[in-house]
Image: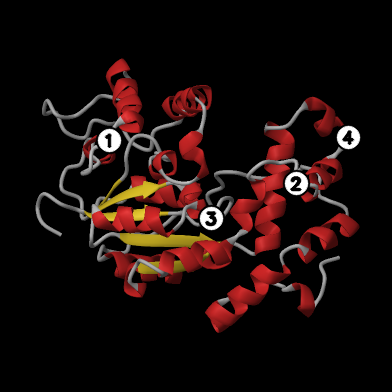
Amino acid sequence: MTETSPTFLYCIGAQKAGTTWLHDYFCDHPDVHVPAVKELHYFNSIFGDERRASAQRRAQMLARAMGEKWGYDQPRRTDDDVIPYPSVEYQAALLYMHADRSPDHRAYRRILLNGWRGEAVAADITPAYAVLEADAYAEMLRIAPGAKFLFIMRDPLKRLISSLRMRHETDVAPVIALQGIDQLCEAYLDGHLAGAERRSHYRKTITELESVVPREQICYLFYERLFTADAINGLADWLGIFYMPAEFNKVVWSASGRDMPSPAMTRRLHATLADEYEFLYSHLGSEIPDTWTAPEQGRPQ
């Protein structure tokens, strides 16, 4: 790192694994810069399936980004290079970022570093990057050779259920919501929820990532241990920043009170993840939290 170049941190997921909580923590950390918009969705707009997203889909994503709560009062600096947020200028910069295809990714860097004042780390926290492939990770590394990649995992079954419960409440047709969450799970098992299954493919993410990124530039954390001083202290050491106490009891998204899948449906969902558990246990071994339960080790009730 130099005075004009922070270490880029790409937090690539997983969905429903504490990335919003970590974003809020980084917003308060004096050694970490985060952009105004939590999820930039830049690399998945030029790599992977989402690069073919319709103009309407992209407009919806940008509108949502502009409506997100900011983690701090930007701009942090008063010089002319800072784009104020929210503003028409910031919206235009986001639009240009997704249209720009310059080799040095200048428009992306401008958004990511907007308001940067010399912090050691600049963090792009976009869980959707977990569905990308090696070519995308190689490009992310090319523009920032010292970049670090953080992949937070959660028990695959619990992550999947949490994601489906959130979708049941916020992002499905009313007829499904009225029928209940088991019907949504059935739709998932039948392949009718486009893209939903990709977020459960930890094996693919790890394989693609490790094929191009040096292992020392990758950190694997687990949701079940994230909210502890040991985990955050270890993350700080890896990033080269000081440990700052965190608000471990802070709730940023709660699924309490929502319907849970029936025991029979839970067992069916669990069985679909057998290959994922097998890979993770063989690859990460004793690092896996004790609370995880692979299908062959017993089915959840």
Which residue is disc 2 drawn over?
191
Cα distance, mark 2 to mark 4?
18 Å
The quadrant of the image that shows the C terminus is bottom right
For label 1, the SS is helix
Residue found at x 15% / y 48%: 118
Q: CA distance from mark 2 to mark 3?
A: 20 Å
Closer to the eye: label 2 or 3: 2
Q: Quadrant of the N terminus?
A: bottom left
The answer to the question of whether label 4 and label 3 lie on touching residues, with beta carbons closer than 8 A, is no
**Picture disc at residue 14:** 3
Question: Which numbered disc covers residue 58?
Answer: none
For image coordinates 85% across by 45% down, the residue present is: 182
Tell me how the rendering is colored.
secondary structure
Give the percent coordinates (x, y) of residue 224.
58, 65
Q: Label 1 belongs to which residue? A: 111
* Residue 127 percent location from the top left of the image: 49, 49
Tag nearer the camera, 2 or 1: 2
Discs 2, 1 touching: Cβ within 8 Å: no
The amino acid marked with disc number 4 is Gln
Circle 3 crowding by C-alpha within 10 Å: few under 14, some 14–19, many from 20: many
**Tag 4 residue:** 179
Mark 2 or 4: the one toward you = 2
Q: Amino acid at mark 1?
A: Ile
Residue 30 vs 220, above or below: the answer is above
- Residue closest to the eye, 5 or 212: 212
Foreground residue among 207 and 79: 207
Kindly report the distance in space between the C-alpha atoms of the residues bearing marks 1 and 4. Answer: 42 Å
